[in-house]
Amino acid sequence: MNNNSSKNKIQMIFSLLVLSLLSYLFWLFITWLISVFNGLQKEVAAALIAASATIVVSVLSVVVAKYYEKKRAIELEHRSKKIPIYEEFVEFLFKLLMN
């Protein structure tokens, strides 16, 4: 039991370190991106921001659509497995009530 607890603590510390590192790298990327946009002309920066926003929205919409499509497929699979069980249950109830 103690070994499992120490393993969980090590995993927690490692995950916090990785999360901190990723947050720091994200912060560096954002500050670098802002400095690049500050050096550009306003028209060019506006066009780049608009193009970037279009790309990000397109990618996010595809990812979200795929997520919901997969979720729907899983629900349909579960439903197809539940139908025979419910039919059997309803049939049993009818037999019980008719007797």
Image (spheres, rainbow, N blue to C red):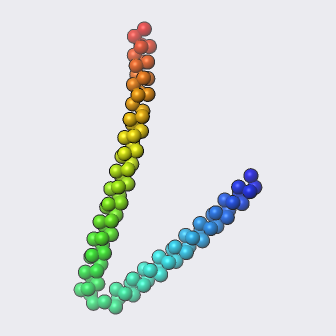
Q: Is residue 74 above or below residue 23?
A: above
- State the image quarter where residue 19 is shown: bottom right
Describe residue 56's horizontal placement relative to residue 82 as left or right: left
Tally of numbered discs? 0
Q: Is residue 35 above or below residue 78?
A: below
Q: Residue furthest top?
A: 99
Describe residue 49's horizontal placement relative to residue 82 as left or right: left
Q: Position of residue 56 (x, y in %)?
A: 33, 69
- At horizontal 59% and vertical 66% (from top left) the residue drawn is 15
- At horizontal 30% and vertical 78% (from top left) the residue drawn is 49
Looking at the rendered image, the quarter that the C terminus falls into is top left
Q: Residue furthest right?
A: 2
Q: Position of residue 30 (x, y in %)?
A: 42, 80
- State the image quarter where residue 38 is shown: bottom left
- State the image quarter where residue 51 is shown: bottom left
Q: Is residue 62 above or below residue 93?
A: below
Q: Is residue 48 above or below residue 74?
A: below
Q: Position of residue 45 (x, y in %)?
A: 29, 84
- At horizontal 57% and vertical 70% (from top left) the residue drawn is 18
Q: Position of residue 39 (x, y in %)?
A: 34, 91
Describe residue 93's horizontal placement relative to residue 2 as left or right: left
